[in-house]
Image (spheres, rainbow, N blue to C red):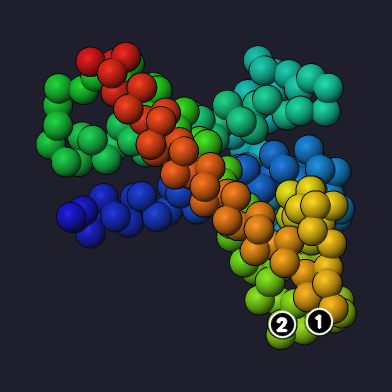
Amino acid sequence: MMNPFSQLIDVLISLYVTVILLRFFLQYFRADFYNPLSQFCVKATDPLIKPLRKVIPGFAGIDFSSLVLAYIVILVKLLLMTLIAGQLNINFLLLVLITFVGLIKSVLNLFVFLIFIRIIMSWISPGGHNPVMAVIGQLSEPIIGVFKKILPPMSGFDFSPMIALIMIYFTMNMVDYYLVPVIQSVAY
């Protein structure tokens, strides 16, 4: 069980990682840049991303500086939580590799969150226009769209978000079941 201080650090840093990843995917999927959510993400992450861009340029429409920043922030979070837990004997190779897993899980959790918000808002306000929902639609559609091609809406019901969520959770379980043990065996 985490102490309250480490739990607070975990939540705050995880929220910031979510904002960084939102910024990355807003750029990658070319979502509306002038949307209030997009502007918030840019303003919240610019102080750390702008200096990184001088060292790590983008390539082929991919903002690598955002991904590197998310990785660094997750690494710092794991390091802080390890130190707060009183573990001074740190295996840095394990920490670096587990950070990679943390980045993968953060991306998957972001899409779970986006798809859940999209589902809930489709029930509450179907067809209503909301600038935040427009961006959530732009971010989640590339994932959901893949499953719409496989299983188009039937009788007014769209099962593609549910299938997308199942596949995301399946991917998370695959990461935990296969990737984490490999990392632990390599690091020890």
Residue displayed at 21% across by 22% down: 90
Q: 135 above or below 26?
A: below
**Helix, strand or loop under label 1:** loop
Q: Which residue is mark 2?
A: 123
Q: Amino acid at mark 2?
A: Trp
Position of the C terminus by quadrant: top left
Q: Position of residue 183 (x, y in %)?
A: 35, 22
> Count the marks: how many?
2
Q: Give how far across and how far down residue 68 sits, in percent.
A: 58, 26
Label drawn at residue 140: none
Residues marked 2 and 1 touching at CB (< 8 Å): yes
- To which quarter of the image does residue 175 belong? top left
Residue 126 badge? 1
Please name whichever residue, 155 or 37, is drawn nearer the observer in this view of the structure.
Answer: 155
Camera-side residue of 50 and 171: 171
Q: Quadrant of the N terminus?
A: bottom left
The residue lying at 62 percent from left, 37 percent from top is 47
Residue 42 in the image, given as x and y percentages of width and height? 71, 46
Q: Residues within 10 Å of mark 2 (few under 14, many from 20)?
A: few
Q: Label 2, secondary structure: give it.
A: helix
Residue at x-position 32% and y-position 27%: 181
